[in-house]
Every structure is written in structure tokens, then in C-alpha cells.
């Protein structure tokens, strides 16, 4: 019953993140880890955005930030800039807000009450210096700032294919992960329904004690072999397709230090700038827009140049598995589920789940039942919170130019948990205590940036004269700090060039 061998089925970002997390945690425990990767199935490779927690993960793997940046076409990401998510007639044709990575109001008490006195201004600009840094296309740190440390909070944009290769190299060289290139053509089960072995086209039947399913949307272990059902979320989140393209950029082109998320009549467009190209994807609801119309919209966004590039349409099955851990198998990445690209939740959930599994990995098969119950409960909670946070971006919009936006405000499509939060926040300014679990994927500052960016007006508390004076002084300190940062931080591309030339300081 002792677990001595683990198979990870599938490579890509999910598979190799799992390999690093598990191999690092289980190193020197006489457990062999083998990653089986199909040589015939390409990775989807459009997940190019991350959140700040990835910095801690990469540092824990012993990956040099300089090497990561130089090898994976990395750029810095300090925010998501949401454009045209509100009615253009009421808020202007180029309305936008930033969901920043630095927490709001860093120099004193929460400034939300001050903003509510005059909500016509940009909330993120009032509460954080990072707004001006982003708008000036500046970097979040200096060349003298050590690896993984920051002046402003940041994550990364990256080349997903190159990232997977770097993770693979790290897992094999540092943690002795075995790598087998073969196709899984059959899965055999024990009498109790757990997985007994895999049949590979090049290596025959291979037995392992525990299995990680990173086989993407196909989910060949958890869904096909173990018959775990799918929880459909398409009635809450309508976006289910994406047209994706890579657009070359000029060597001296400005690199925005944020993801652009531009809304259209039936979804939105992501625009992620790497050092030498942009990854662009138009996501949409097939119930509100057909494929030809989607391509036409993306073509207009790219100034009529779409036909110059190779593009493809990706269907997205919206939802997640009813169980993430069944018997002796855990699913990660797209095998676990997928909602949509908003807020870079795919890599974030994969990283979170893999790290959680590594910290609670069974040493004996008899532990699987109790550990799986806790894992499934935790991950179900996390996925439901992501559904709520993603839906909030749509149901708060006041756009009336299409059925897509009107349908998103239908109360029947809004998760009960989100409805309860919004009802509470109509009467109170959001507090961290409103999000009571340690497994919340998004914290109160994330909600504040989106709620107030979307002009959702929570209860307007009357401020005393003394509180008003203190709040204005706090806001003035943030403005002065913004001016100082804009004078001293380098341009985004300038810092990336220096990193490629000199590297960052080691910690």
C-alpha cells in the first residue's frame, strides 16, 4: 500500500508545474516521479498571463528570475486594464479601469470611503501609485532590485511553450523527474476502481501507485477512465470560444506592463505584449456571436491585418470536474476544468492545486480517502469563488448594446454566493472579514478594484471632518509617491533589455 511511484500524464505548464511541486516536496523519500508526455499532441499554449503568487513558486523551485525572463520572452505584468466594460454613452468610448497588483491604500486607512464621496474619479488612481506607473509604461523594479523582489507588485507575461520547457529542464535536472515521450492508449483498473496501470504505445504496460492527470480537456484518466462527471457552468459564464493569434512587434515597440482586456458586444479581447510579439485572443459566447463574426471583430481590432497571421479557434468547455481527486488519481490544469481566461485563473489554480497536493501527498494508498475528501472540498470552494469573481465582471456592466450584456445581468445567471456579496456590499464597504476562508482565491483588494472600477457604488458612509482631512493627506502622499516612482523607475522595455544584458542581482 506504500506509494513509491507517481505518474504524471501530460506535459505543458500544468504537467511540469506539478512535476516540480511534487518532486521538490517528495525529494529524498524514495518516490519516483515519471512524466509521460505525448509527442503527438501539442499543448494549447495560450495561457500567457500569471498572477503575483507565481514569483514565490518559481523562487521555491530554485529557478533564476533572470534565466526565466531571458529564456521565456517574459515581460512584467502589474495590472489588468479593463477597457470598454461600461456603457460608452454614459462613461465615454474609452472608459477603463485597472485591476492593480499592489494593494490599495498602502500608506494608511482604506481610502474607499473618500473615493465614494466623488466616484467620478478613477478609484485605482486614488488608492495606488501603480496606476500612474502602468499608464506611463514603466517597469515594477530597477535593475539593482534583487531577483523576485519588487518596488511595485508584479507577475509576468510569458511564452507558455518556452515556460514549459524551462520547468521541464528544472524538474529533470534538480529533482530527478523521469520523462517518457509516449501516448497512453489504454488505462487498466483494479477491482476497487482505482488505476492499476497505463498502456503506452512505445513502452507497453506500466504500473504506478499514484497518478496525476494533466492531459488537458480530454482528461483521459479522471474523466474517461474513472468516469468523474463534469459540472457545467455555461449558464453562468457564457464565454465558450476564443480566436487566438500571435502578432509580431517591432524591436523598439512600447511594452505595456499590463494585460489589456477590451470588451466587445459578446465577450472581450485579451492583448498580451511579450518582448517580440503580442498574444491576442478574442473570447466570445457562441450563443451571441458566430465564428465568422468573431473573426471579423478580431480583424477590426488588428486594423484589418488578421489574414497576415496564422490564427485558430479554440472551443472552451466551461466548468470543472465534480471531483478533482478520485481513488488514486488527481487532475490538475485543464483536466481539472476551465472557466475562461479572465484574471489569468488557469495557471493560478493549477499552481495552487499542485502546491496544495504536494503539501498533503499520501505516503500510503489508505490515506487517499481522507485526503481526497479534504482536497475536493478545498478545490470545489476555490473553483466556485473563481466562477463568482469572473461573473462579477459581466453582471456589473451597464452595457445595453447587445443581448450578451443584458443576459449577463439576469439574476438567474448570477451565482448565489455572488448575489449575497453584492447585496451586502450595497449597504457596506467591502472588508476582508466578508471573505472568511483561507482558501479564497481573490482577496478583498481584488474585489475593490473591480467593484469600484465598474462603478458599483457601495454604501456611502458620511465622513467626519477629521477623517476627511486624514484621508486626503493619505491620498496626497500616494500622489507624491507616484511622481517619485515615475521619475525613477525605468521604461518597461529598457529594464528588460538591461536584464538580458546584465541580469538581476541574486538574492
Image: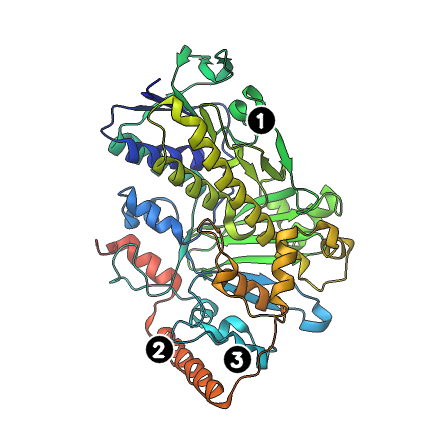
Q: Tell which residue pokes out farthest to the top in this image.
A: 204
Q: Position of residue 178 (x, y in %)?
A: 32, 24
State the colouring used for the structure image: rainbow
Q: Position of residue 447 (x, y in %)?
A: 54, 61
Q: Disc 2 to disc 1, how far (Cα)? A: 55 Å
In the foreground, 47 or 307: 47
Lateral position of residue 402 relative to residue 321, left or right: right
Residue that label 1 marks: 228
Q: Nearer the viewer, mark 2 or mark 1?
A: 1
Q: Which mark is residue 484?
A: 2
Quarter of the image with the C terminus in it: bottom left
Left or right of 60, for residue 91 = right
Q: Secondary structure at mark 1?
A: loop
Q: Dot 1: within a 10 Å radius of its alpha carbon, few (fewer than 14), some, or many (20 or more) residues?
A: some
Q: Is residue 289 visible?
A: yes
Contact between marks 3 and 1 (CB within 8 A): the answer is no
Q: Which mark is residue 398?
A: none
Q: Is residue 178 above or below residue 337?
A: above
Q: Residue furthest bottom?
A: 465
Q: Considering only order in the chain, which callout, 3 or 2, is on the residue closer to the N terminus?
A: 3
**Disc 3 packing (10 Å; few <14; some 14–19; many ≥20):** many
Label 2 packing within 10 angstroms: few (<14), some (14-19), many (20+) = few
- Write the residue at 50% across / 28% down: 215
**Residue pointed to by mark 3:** 114
At which x and y percent is residue 398?
71, 64
Image quadrant in which the N terminus is located: top left
Q: Earlier in the sequence, mark 2 or mark 1?
A: 1
Residue 21, image x, y percentages: 34, 37
Amino acid at each position: 500500500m506504500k506509494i513509491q511511484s507517481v505518474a504524471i500524464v501530460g506535459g505543458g505548464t500544468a504537467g511540469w508545474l506539478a512535476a516540480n511541486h511534487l518532486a521538490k516536496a517528495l525529494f529524498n523519500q524514495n518516490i519516483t516521479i515519471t512524466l509521460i508526455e505525448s509527442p503527438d499532441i501539442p499543448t494549447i499554449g495560450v495561457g500567457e498571463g500569471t498572477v503575483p503568487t507565481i514569483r514565490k513558486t518559481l523562487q521555491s523551485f530554485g529557478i533564476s528570475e533572470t534565466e526565466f525572463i531571458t529564456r521565456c520572452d517574459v515581460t512584467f505584468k502589474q495590472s489588468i486594464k479593463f477597457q470598454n466594460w461600461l456603457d460608452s454613452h454614459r462613461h465615454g468610448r474609452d472608459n477603463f479601469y485597472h485591476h492593480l497588483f499592489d494593494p490599495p491604500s498602502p500608506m494608511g486607512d482604506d481610502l474607499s470611503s473618500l473615493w465614494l464621496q466623488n466616484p467620478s474619479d478613477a478609484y485605482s488612481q486614488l488608492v495606488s501609485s501603480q496606476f500612474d506607473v502602468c499608464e506611463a509604461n514603466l517597469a515594477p523594479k530597477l535593475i539593482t532590485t534583487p531577483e523576485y523582489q519588487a518596488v511595485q507588485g508584479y507577475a509576468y507575461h510569458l511564452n507558455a511553450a518556452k515556460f514549459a520547457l524551462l520547468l521541464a529542464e528544472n524538474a529533470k535536472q534538480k529533482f530527478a523527474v523521469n520523462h517518457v515521450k509516449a501516448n497512453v492508449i489504454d488505462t487498466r483498473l483494479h477491482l476497487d476502481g482505482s488505476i492499476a496501470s497505463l498502456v503506452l504505445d512505445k513502452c507497453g504496460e506500466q504500473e504506478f501507485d499514484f497518478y496525476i492527470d494533466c492531459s488537458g480537456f480530454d482528461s483521459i484518466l479522471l474523466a474517461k477512465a474513472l468516469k468523474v462527471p463534469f459540472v457545467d457552468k455555461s449558464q453562468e459564464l457564457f464565454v465558450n470560444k476564443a480566436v487566438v493569434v500571435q502578432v509580431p512587434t517591432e524591436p523598439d515597440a512600447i511594452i505595456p506592463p499590463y494585460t489589456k482586456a477590451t470588451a466587445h458586444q459578446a465577450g472581450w479581447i485579451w492583448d498580451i505584449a511579450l518582448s517580440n510579439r503580442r498574444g491576442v485572443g478574442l473570447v466570445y459566447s457562441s450563443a451571441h456571436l458566430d465564428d465568422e463574426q468573431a473573426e471579423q471583430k478580431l480583424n477590426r481590432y488588428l486594423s484589418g491585418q488578421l489574414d497576415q497571421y496564422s490564427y485558430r479557434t479554440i472551443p472552451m468547455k466551461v466548468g470543472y470536474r465534480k471531483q478533482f481527486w478520485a481513488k488514486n488519481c488527481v487532475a490538475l490544469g485543464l483536466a481539472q476544468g476551465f472557466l475562461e481566461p479572465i484574471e489569468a485563473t488557469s495557471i493560478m489554480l493549477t499552481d495552487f492545486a499542485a502546491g496544495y497536493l504536494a503539501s498533503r501527498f499520501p505516503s500510503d494508498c489508505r490515506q487517499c480517502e481522507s485526503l481526497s475528501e479534504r482536497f475536493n472540498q478545498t478545490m470545489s470552494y476555490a473553483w466556485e469563488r473563481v466562477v463568482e469573481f469572473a461573473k462579477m465582471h459581466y453582471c456589473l456592466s451597464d452595457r445595453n448594446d447587445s443581448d450578451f450584456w443584458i443576459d449577463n445581468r439576469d439574476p438567474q445567471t448570477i451565482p448565489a454566493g455572488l448575489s449575497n456579496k453584492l447585496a451586502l456590499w450595497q449597504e457596506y464597504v467591502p472588508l476582508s472579514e466578508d471573505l472568511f476562508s483561507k482558501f479564497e482565491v481573490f482577496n478583498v483588494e481584488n474585489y475593490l478594484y473591480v467593484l469600484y472600477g465598474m462603478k458599483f457604488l457601495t454604501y456611502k458612509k458620511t465622513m467626519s471632518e477629521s477623517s476627511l482631512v486624514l484621508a486626503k493627506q493619505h491620498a496626497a502622499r500616494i500622489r507624491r509617491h507616484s511622481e517619485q516612482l515615475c521619475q525613477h523607475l525605468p521604461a518597461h522595455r529598457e529594464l528588460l533589455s538591461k536584464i538580458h544584458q546584465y541580469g538581476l542581482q541574486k538574492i
